[in-house]
Image (spheres, coloured by chain):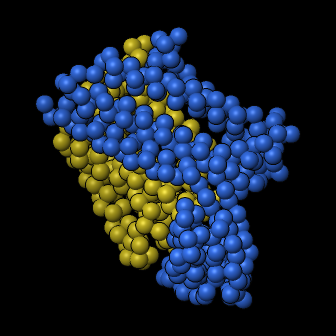
Amino acid sequence: MLGVLKSIKTALYLLGTGMVIFLAGSVYIPNNLDIFSEINDYPLFKWLFANLGYIDKTYWIFASIVVMAALSLNMVVCTVDAIVNKLSRKGIIQKLSPHIVHTGVMLVLFGHLVSGALGFKKDIPARVGDTVTVNNLEIQIKDLNFVTLRGEDQERWRVSLLVRNREGSERVSVAEPASPVFESRLAIYAKSAEHNGRILLGVVYDPGVRWEISGAVIFVLGSAGLFWSRYNRLST
Amino acid sequence: MSHLFVVLFISTLYALGMLGGRQGSAFFVAGMVVNLSYLVLRWGLLNRLPVTDRFDILLFIAFVISLSYFYLHTAKRIEGVMNVLPLFSAGLSLLAVFQERIDTISPNMNSPWFYLYMILFIIGFSLMGIGSVTGILYLQKAVQSLEMLQHRFILAGWLFFSFALIAGSVWFFLAYGVYWLWTAKELWTTIAWFYYSFYLHARLVNSMKGAIASEIGLAGFGIMLFSYLGVTPILGSPWTQF
């Protein structure tokens, strides 16, 4: 059993199966937009369980989760085996780097799982002067400005927000396109704004992001090790 | 219209590289000079890096792939490079003709993370293209060092492609509050990433070494091209300008 789990052929079968599942998904999504139109607006598991009635169209997502879990297990066993049985001081970076890359990928997958299970998203229509409360966070919309930057195809809105957290401390920050305000683990977006003062705020809580970022950093470190060891091998 | 003329001109110069010898090289290098000049001109006109629409991105990729001429042909002196490399440079620049040229960007795209994402994507895509060039040469000549080169270019390309996905996820989270979308386009990006992961691992299996691994690696570029240019029109994924 352990032999199968750490086998590189198992990884190949799982990668192949994953590709077939995603291929199926890429056909299901555009052909069933009535079902999938809101999949990106909710955390994955919340959406999946709300749409259990369409299991004949969403089964591939469950299948992809199973394959990702199996692939993660394969990577864990492979990495542990390499560290316990094959690691030696000679060429340690060359031997360890692929496993550091694997660890990064596993953390990213885990982060995805955490986001899908524990994430939270909410859109709040509001106006300048309004105060809204989300997760014990008070957000007051102080001001709204528009600027036109060269090359942009529409006016850029800048929404000034007074954010008061549960401890009572407050600060004023500006939310604009691609630049949300972060406070108390929440990201506050100014998703759209109109000249009449109407604003669509978006609030996102995504506990998976920390894992994703950690995974990305570890992936980059492992990649650097791969580059370094290959370069060394080439130059010697 | 004048832009299309320039692109056709660049593409023709690249294609004339196939004439071989000094003449072919002169045409090919001239293609690179015109390609680079055009990108610099676009940079000046747009006042930002020309990496925000597919028209410019394809020309960028064609140029970066062409740069491998100096490594594969001039430095390594690999025979037959000019029979294959011009096909990639000319083909990719020609594909730009079918793309819409867009001079503006949405405010959400105007982020350093977006530019980093596109630059890393262009480098990754180009390295995989160069890997395909060496893969074709290996299948023609059966010289082991060419298969090794193919592997190294694809490995580097896969890493840059991965870095691009990381930067793209950061940008998308800052812009839209999610780092992943369930769309056909994203799924095909994942398929492409999985496919090259498959190639990198398959090469470690004895029964898949050599020509089989090289063919698997070569097919990966087709998947990259389809995931970049084919998914939206054929499968019906939401349109993006980049």
Q: List x then y, in percent, for residue A217.
A: 39, 48
Image-based side of A53 in relation to A92, left or right = right
Viewer-proximal residue, A44 or B175? A44
| Residue found at the far right of this picture | A53
The residue that appears at 29% across and 51% down in the rendered structure is B67
Image height check: is B101 above or below A192?
above
The residue that appears at 30% across and 18% down in the rendered structure is A86
Image height check: is A142 above or below B40?
below
Which chain does the yellow colour mark?
B
Image height check: is B239 above or below B209?
below
Q: Colour of chain A?
A: blue
Viewer-proximal residue, B235 or A160? A160
The residue that appears at 50% across and 61% down in the rendered structure is B171
Viewer-proximal residue, A63 or B198? A63
Task: Name the quadrant containing residue B242.
Answer: bottom right
In this view of the protein, can residue B188 be seen by the observer?
no
In this view of the protein, can residue A183 be seen by the observer?
yes
Q: List x then y, in percent, for residue B160.
A: 39, 46
| Residue found at the far front of this picture | A167
Image-based side of B42 in relation to A147, left or right = left
The residue that appears at 61% across and 88% down in the rendered structure is A143
